[in-house]
Amino acid sequence: MLVDLRVSRVQVILSADFNREEVSIKRTGRNPSFLNGVCLEKNKQYTARNSNILELVENGCKYRVKFNKSLECPSIPKANKPITTNSVNTENSDLSPPLKKMKPSIEPCPSQERENKVEWIETKKSLLLCKYGEVDQLIQNTRSKNNLFQIAAFDLDGTIIKTKSGKVHPKGPTDWMIWNDKVPPSLKKLYSDGYLIVIISNQASLKFHANVNPFKSKVEAILEHLNVPMVVLISTDEDFFRKPAPGMWFYLKDVVLGGSQCSMDDSFYVGDAAGRVVKWKPGKAKDFSISDRFFANNVQLTFKTPEAFFLGEREGQYEEPEFLPWDYSTTHNLDDICGDLKSSTSEVIVMVGLPASGKSTFVKTHLVPKGYVSINRDTLGTAAKCEKLLKESLSSRKKVVVDNTNLDVETRRKIVNICQQFNVVPRCFLMDSNFQRCQHNNKFRIIKGGDHAVITPMVMRASLSKFLAPKKEEGFLDIVHVPFIPKFKDDEDRKLYNYHLLVPK
């Protein structure tokens, strides 16, 4: 029987959905209840999933949600039949007293019974956070002594584990094995030396799965096998949390560690996406990516490959990146390029550039203020409306800029032909942003949000395949090259832009 006087006779109402492996929770009691540390508002529905922690009252009566399909229990109530947690006598000591009828669903919180168990914590939509064992005690002890955290961070696939099948991608949640026998003792040694061990991994494929519980079960099995207290951070989308972007590192420092400082000289990151060349080791293919090395570079961590860290091998040769986000002009003055725009007669400027090359920003900041009419298909909706506005503007002897990608000769020819009808020879302004710069700009926009439409990788590649550099022979008076010179709202935006936000392809 529950003895905590803070628990109402009907403190919460629970309803289990065994197909979705979810428990609906509604707090009805007078005193607050908590789900994963979040206070539940009275009479509001909440959803708990596998391994979530329910506290009937603050710091008391803790229970962990657990669906165990291996248990047979014919007396399980239907999902739509609510179960109330009022005072219940229990005849089965294996069951949580207030939830006796939900035998396969909820059990006492393991943190009250045994050490080294897994706790999944609700975070951002695209981020999974898991804690294993006494990691909170390590964090609290380090913070209480005002010590710097020593972080030993690792990628998951290809670093801590590999597939049993030998396939590049696992065939299922059980297709894994420890990467090397030296991994478990190495992690135990790090923990005994006072390191906070953290797994930081990209798992973007999870965004296509309505149920991530199989993956969570996989992580739990890995953690049980390693049996070392640690933190796990998993990115599940293409946003700021996805490596090489530094979002997971910032979340670790600012949220998990509560803003505490780390000893950067002693901390490091280990990953297999190191950008190594073909035959960096006899018989080895080139690395599939350089994202782990970029991630470590972003957050100023020492980077190591698993072969070097666990096996003591020499670091393999890797390719220096061709594209560096911070390598852009700061000396050019775009106003100088636009200086010869004082004509009082009609003029047409045809912009040419890939998506996210900076065309529209250039037009808005340097041409529209000089009296140019901006013609943009994204704004007007159709090519026919763009042609109509171009003709109307030329009839009124206005200055015009056609702010579309205008990637191919045929598209540009239509504009030139209209200009010829009004005896105007257009100029072409070509954005010098290369494909990698445009990919980076697009990712920056996605992270920042705002009015820009999200451009998918498929659209970006299709645009590149369509692009043909313009020539004066197409009917242009001149081809003016416009360098990419970003302007930032503040220093934080500048810092964000200068990170490796993705691995350009």
Image (spheres, rainbow, N blue to C red):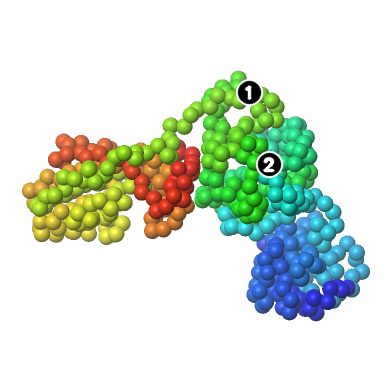
Where is residue 178 drawn, in percent x and y? 72, 36
- Left or right: residue 143 versus residue 460 is right
The quarter of the image holding the C terminus is top left
Using the image as rendered, state which of residue 268 and residue 13 is in the foreground. 268
Image marks 1 and 2: residues in contact by CB distance under 8 Å: no
Residue drawn where x is 33% and y is 42% of the image: 484
- Find residue 69 and report its image quarter: bottom right
State whether residue 291 appears in this view: no
Where is residue 453 drawn, in percent x and y? 39, 55
The earlier-in-sequence mark between 1 and 2 is 2
Marking on residue 314: 1
Residue drawn where x is 55% and y is 24% of the image: 317
Residue drawn where x is 19% and y is 48% of the image: 349
- Find residue 437 and report its image quarter: top left
- The amino acid marked with disc number 1 is Arg
Residue drawn where x is 73% and y is 71% of the image: 33
Q: Residues within 10 Å of mark 2 (few under 14, many from 20)?
A: many
Q: Nearer the viewer, mark 1 or mark 2?
A: 2
- Left or right: residue 363 versus residue 97 is left
Q: Secondary structure at mark 2?
A: loop
Marking on residue 485: none
Where is residue 213 drawn, in percent x and y? 68, 54
- Left or right: residue 146 versus residue 116 is left
Q: Secondary structure at mark 1?
A: loop
- The amino acid marked with disc number 2 is Gln
Using the image as rendered, state which of residue 477 and residue 384 is in the foreground. 477
Please give the residue where the numbered disc 2 appears in the rendered image.
Answer: 150
State whether residue 482 appears in this view: yes
Where is residue 284 drawn, in percent x and y? 59, 24
